[in-house]
Amino acid sequence: MDVVFEELAQEYPVTQFLRVEAEELPDISEEYGVSAVPFFVILKDHKVVDQVEGADAATLTQKVTKHFRSLAASVTGPIAPSAKSRIASNGAASTSGAENGVGSKQQSQQALQPRLDKLVHSAPVMLFMKGTPKEPRCGFSAKVVDALQQAGIEFKHFNILSDDAVRQGLKDFTQWPTYPQLLVNGELLGGCDIIMEMQQDGSLKTAVQEALGAKFDTNTALQQRIKQLLDSSPVVLFMKGNPDAPRCGFSQKVVSALRSIDVPFDSHDILTDEELRQGLKDYSQWPTYPQLYVKGELLGGCDVILEMQQDGELKHAINDALGAGSAAPVEQRIHKLLKDNPVMLFMKGSRDEPRCGFSQRVVAALQAIQEPFETFDILSDDDVRQGLKKMSDWPTFPQLYVSGELLGGCDIITEMANSGDLQDTVEEMKNRMT
């Protein structure tokens, strides 16, 4: 198009031809609605009379001829300076200056080459843009960022405004004169116009995936393999070694915890499969092993599992994740206890041997008002303990029920006892039942 542009300038000497680098003057680009390069704007009397989008030499020639033939025909006498001297450019160096700088430019490019090579390969999908994805500094960069985000394509970026050496050097590296530039696996996929065209016809994500090639296919296959392993059993432990011969103390502890609650599980030795070992870390976003999964979801690593075991909640957490059908029978047992006992205290230990200070206080408060009551030791039955938390939406014990309704925990009962309201409240709730 440069040759066509120069020939037109020579043919129409009274017409001024200007070349503008779109990326250098984004305000002008926005003003004239430049959506792709090259983009030609034809003005007469400071007004836009025509436009040509893309490298369409025939259309450009036709429209220039249409608007300026009459002016060219009226010219008499000597014509203006040569076409090349009249094709002005915002930042183009003179011919002599360019010739003088060839040697130094080549040397500079050679020194920059290793850095550029490292930059373009710093991520599978790399966007060289003006500004950042959160704060683009030109409309073209903003459009490409939006296109990538809408397509769900993960990418890293480099702000070419922060490093002029990279900005100029990458143009020679990719043989592409403008920004933004999208590179996949170190290869140029395109600039703004190409990316926007791909977005519009729905081929952007596919093009990126194809450019990623084998790496994308491998990752997809690994993800599918991990999913198949997780679907192979309701409870799956990825560990070092196997249950009978663990290869690390953390794996051994989790195996012991699972066996202590009689939970059947499958295991996979990540030491024998490095691809699985690394891939599962990305899949779960969990950096260490062992990893315990229930119904395909990560329950936790060693610390989490041991904490659950110590709290007596491991079996319940696994059953809950499995959707075990024990909830209804537990609720029925609790309802029967509440129905058979007008005043019922769920506590740690028994009235004669409380196993925590809070339970002891509530027992003392009830004995002080000489109120008959029954107790249930939640330490002896974890199903009731966990089921009651869900039923009452009350996370701690003891819990005092009167006529099947929760009256409160330790703090509330102690406060009522201190204020003298406990006996009256209990009697009132009992009378409501009758």
Image (cartoon, helix red, strand yellow):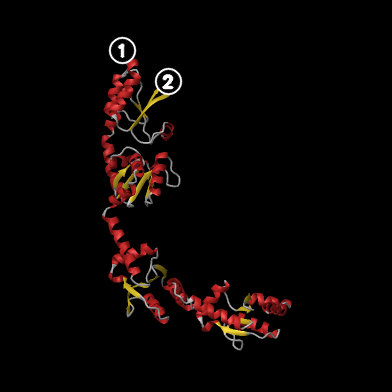
Residue 211 shown left or right of residue 330 in the figure? left
Residue 427 against residue 157 in the figure, above or below = below
* Residue furthest to the bottom: 352
Mark 1 burial class by Cα count in 10 Å: few <14, some 14-19, many 20+? few
Secondary element under disc 1, as helix, strand or loop, is loop
Figure quadrant of residue 50? top left
Measuring from the top left, give residue 331's x and y in whole percent: 53, 77
Label 2 neighbour load within 10 Å: few <14, some 14-19, many 20+? few
Q: Is residue 385 visible?
A: no
**Residue picked out by circle 1:** 78
Q: Residue 334 in the image: x percent, y percent? A: 55, 79
Q: Nearer the viewer, residue 177 or 430?
A: 430
Residue under pointer 2: 45
Image depth: mark 1 or mark 2 in front: 2
Residue for point 33% across, 20% down: 66
- The amino acid marked with disc number 1 is Pro
Quadrant where the N terminus sits is top left
Q: Are marks 1 and 2 in contact (CB under 8 Å)?
A: no
Sequence-wise, which precedes: disc 1 or disc 2?
A: 2
Left/right placement of residue 350 relative to residue 139 reads right
Query: SS of the residue at dot 2?
Result: loop
Q: Residue at x 44, y 32 (%)?
A: 31
Does any portion of residue 72 appear in the rendered image?
A: yes
Residue 95 place in picture, x, y as percent:
29, 28
Instruction: Kindly identify the amino acid type of the residue bearing the numbered disc 2.
Output: Asp
In the displayed structure image, the side of residue 417 where residue 216 appears, left or right: left
- Residue farthest to the top, as pictured: 77
Look at the image and tell me in which quarter the C terminus lies. Answer: bottom right
- Which residue, as the protein is rendered here, is positioned at the far front? 434
- Left or right of 345 on screen, residue 67: left
